[in-house]
Image (cartoon, rainbow, N blue to C red):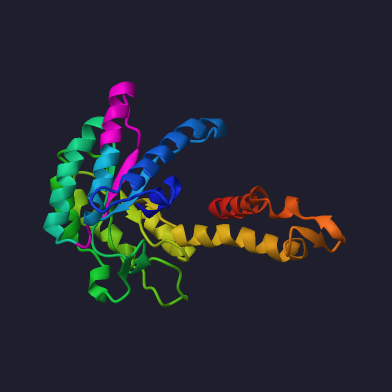
Amino acid sequence: EGGACFFAGKGLPNDKGKLQASILGACAGAHYVRNVAPAYGIPVLVHSDHCAKKLLPWFDGMLEADEVFFKENGEPLFSSHMLDLSEEPHEENVGICKTYFERMAPMGIILEMEIGITGGAEDGVDNTGVAKDKLYSTPEDTQLVWDTLSPISPMFTIAAAFGNVHGVYKPGNVRLQPELLDSFQKNLGPKVGYEKPFFFVFHGGSGSEKSDISNAVDYGVVKMNVDTDTQWAYWEGLLKFYKAKSGYLQGQIGNPEGEDKPNKSYYDPRKWVRCSEETMRDRVIE
């Protein structure tokens, strides 16, 4: 929601209970991606992330836009939406997800929902002091989600907690247990006749060991969030540019080539924003 508001412009009104700027920014971003993505020739999903209960007006606004777009084009504006109600009691979390999923399924929209708690802090939600047992979901948690949502549509994913923490931490400070995801698959699989019935999402993936990522994918992870890693990668491009061109960035006029030489071609935002885009692109490829 914060990113959507930023895209529209932080100077716009974004009233509590309305979140009109966040709705506008999300929908504008979705239309932008839909128009530009075909030129790149790669498949793209348009997804909204981390909608907590207090942000449901934002979710409602995006769904209304989906319904209008669907009526006109036969497909929704967004590919998927995430409801992050993990702070609520589990039954309430799943129940609200069910209500929204019944509205989303006829349009073919994927629902991502979260159970358990991802540690650390992100987007104004601080879970740094949460009890460690809350960082791990249970087979009963995932079973309730399946029993409630699968009769509606198979197009849902679960961000189950297996020790995930937002942010990047020193090795050893975060204990991931991706084998939990495997246990959830094995618990439900024989009951429904599928080896891997669940589609999982890996939250807090930044800084994770490659072995943990590989295991998580083997156990059914289809999406991984790496916001912190990509934020650093974007900043690193700007940092490297500044260090390399520092002498050209201390004033509009005057640089190592002469005190009367102009520096416009160096401080032009298009120059250093592109450097940030390149380092972020390289990190995604990696």
Judge by depth and name the residue closer to the eye, 185 or 98. 98
Judge by depth and name the residue closer to the eye, 113 or 27. 27
Judge by depth and name the residue closer to the eye, 149 or 16. 16
| Residue at 56% from the left image edge and 57% from the top image edge | 234
Q: Residue 219: x percent and y percent?
A: 34, 55
> Is residue 54 highlighted in magenta?
no
> Is residue 73 highlighted in magenta?
yes
**Does residue 74 appear in this view?**
yes
**Drawn side of residue 117 relative to residue 27, left or right:** left
Magenta region, residue range: 64-87
Quadrant of the image for the C terminus? Answer: bottom right
Q: Quadrant of residue 8?
A: top left
Residue that extends furthest to the right in the rendered view of this protein: 258
Q: Residue 56: x percent and y percent?
A: 23, 49
**Drawn side of residue 202 relative to residue 58, left or right:** right
Q: Quadrant of residue 242?
A: bottom right
**Does residue 157 appear in this view?**
no
| Residue at 24% from the left image edge and 42% from the top image edge | 60
| Residue at 27% from the left image edge and 40% from the top image edge | 61
| Depicted 80 relative to depicted 251: above or below | above
Q: Residue 113: x percent and y percent?
A: 26, 51
**How many numbered callouts?**
0
Q: Residue 67: x percent and y percent?
A: 26, 31
**Drawn side of residue 219 relative to residue 35, left or right:** left
**Drawn side of residue 215 relative to residue 19, left or right:** right
| Residue at 12% from the left image edge and 55% from the top image edge | 92
